[in-house]
Each structure stands twice: as C-alpha cells, then as structure tokens.
Image: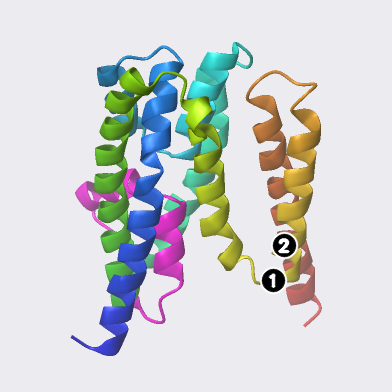
Amino acid sequence: MTSQIAATWRMALSVSVATGAYGVSFGALAVAAGLDVWQTMVLSLLMYTGGSQFAFVGALAGGGLPAAGAAVLVGLRNAVYVMQVNSWFHPRLAQRILMAHVTTDESAAVAAAQPDQRLRKLGFWATGVGVFTLWNVMTLAGALLGNLMGDPKAWGLDGAAIAAFCGLLWPRLVARDAVATAVVAAVVTVALVPVLPAGLPVLSAVVVGGGAAWHQIRRSARAEGTR
C-alpha cells in the first residue's frame, strides 16, 4: 500500500468515525420528536441526508415549517454534489444510483481532496460507505438510548450534532470568502432563531450560502471572459 493510498484511507476513516458518531444525536432527537425506533431507522437508511434529517425532526418537534419541506430544501445541496460526482466518475446507471445514495458533504469533500482519479474514487467510496454504515449504527444506538434517557436536550445531544458538524466544516474553510460566508450564515441563523418558526433559520443559512456561491460563479465567469 502506497503512502497516498494509506493517507486516503486514514482521511476516509477519520471522517467516517467523526460523522457517524453524531448519528446518536439524530436517533435520540428523532425519538424525542415523536418517531419510534423503526421510523427513525427508515429515515437514516432511506433519507440519509444528515442535515436534512435534523431539519426534519427539528421542524417536526417545533411544529413550525412543514417537516418534509424543511428536509427537501436543506437536502437540495446534495444535487450539486451528485452532479460533481457524475462528472468525475461517469458511472453506469446501477453505480449512479448507489453513488447518489452515499453522496454527502463528507464523501464529496474527501474525494475532492485527492490528487488523482484513482484516489478520488477510493476516497469517495471509502467515506461514503463508512459514513453510511456508522451513521445508521449510531442512529439505532441513539434511538434505543433515547427511550431510556428522557429528554436528549438535557444531555446536550441537540448541541452535539451542531458542534460535530462545525468541527468537520471549519478545517475545510481555507479561503477568505468561505470563512466570511460561514460567519455571515451563522450570524443570520442565530439572529432569526427567536423570531422565525422552526426550520426557517437553518434555511436562511442555505440562502446566504447559495447567494455567495452564485456571486462567486458570476465573478469567475467575468474573470474568464476578460482573459
């Protein structure tokens, strides 16, 4: 095994463990929101979109924005990742379906970090399968524990998911524009929490990020046009 392959495996494993670990928060919060263990597991097995799952149970528990609508809107980012993955690998139909299911922030990010096509494919599959497996195992653990521990907020599990996601995201924000966008999105979300129904503050962050991405695309296009 070459050093590059070993490094890709280490990255995939570390991301899988870190991401999968906070599936326990989703399991506990889903049960607290009124879902049973089987319903919680179906969400993680079939919906499997991380942030969208939290948006769904958050809206469900808060009685604010319709839960399905919140989940769909937050999950739209995955469509962008799927298009990127298709452009990398040009998979057959059966592979495309499976790849679409395990395409997440993490699998796309680990793949994008690799220097060549072979390592990119390894990073994508190792992370995609690793996160999917551990996420579902920890979702089951959280759902079972949620029935025993009572209110998961008393244990800090509602904040654990956010903290873990921020811990994964922040090291990837190396560009000044990305850091500025993340800070603005966080400030807008926190400011809107007291005044908007559950689910909408998170969606406001999506709007901020989408606007920043659109601005960056237009700026890049103008730069290309002046060359």
* SS state under label 1: loop
Task: Work out which quarter of the rendered image holds the C terminus and state it.
Answer: bottom right
Identity of the amino acid at label 2? Answer: Val
**Label 2 Cα crowd, 10 Å radius (few <14 / some 14-19 / many 20+):** some
Is residue 199 visible in the rendered image? The answer is yes
**Residue 106 is a magenta residue:** yes
The residue carrying mark 2 is: 179
* SS state under label 2: helix
Q: Nearer the viewer, residue 193 or 112?
A: 193
Identify the residue at horizontal 75%, vertical 21% (top origin). Answer: 196
x and y percentages locating residue 95 in the rendered image: 23, 52
Separation of marks 2 and 1 at Cα, in angstroms = 6 Å
Identity of the amino acid at label 1? Answer: Ala
- Please provide the residue range marked out in magenta: 91-117
The residue carrying mark 1 is: 175
x and y percentages locating residue 184 in the rendered image: 79, 50
Is residue 89 visible in the rendered image? The answer is no
Q: Nearer the viewer, residue 61 or 115?
A: 61
Picture colour scheme: rainbow
Identify the residue at horizontal 38%, vertical 60% (top origin). Answer: 15
Dominant SS type (magenta): helix
Q: Give yes or no for contact between labels 2 and 1 (Cβ–Cβ under 8 Å).
A: yes
Q: Is residue 207 above or below residue 117?
A: above
Identify the residue at horizontal 42%, vertical 50% (top origin). Answer: 104
Task: Work out which quarter of the rendered image holds the N terminus and state it.
Answer: bottom left
Q: Is residue 222 left or right of residue 136?
A: right
Identify the residue at horizontal 31%, vertical 72% (top origin). Answer: 10
x and y percentages locating residue 218 in the rendered image: 76, 60
Which of the 4 image quarters holds residue 179? bottom right
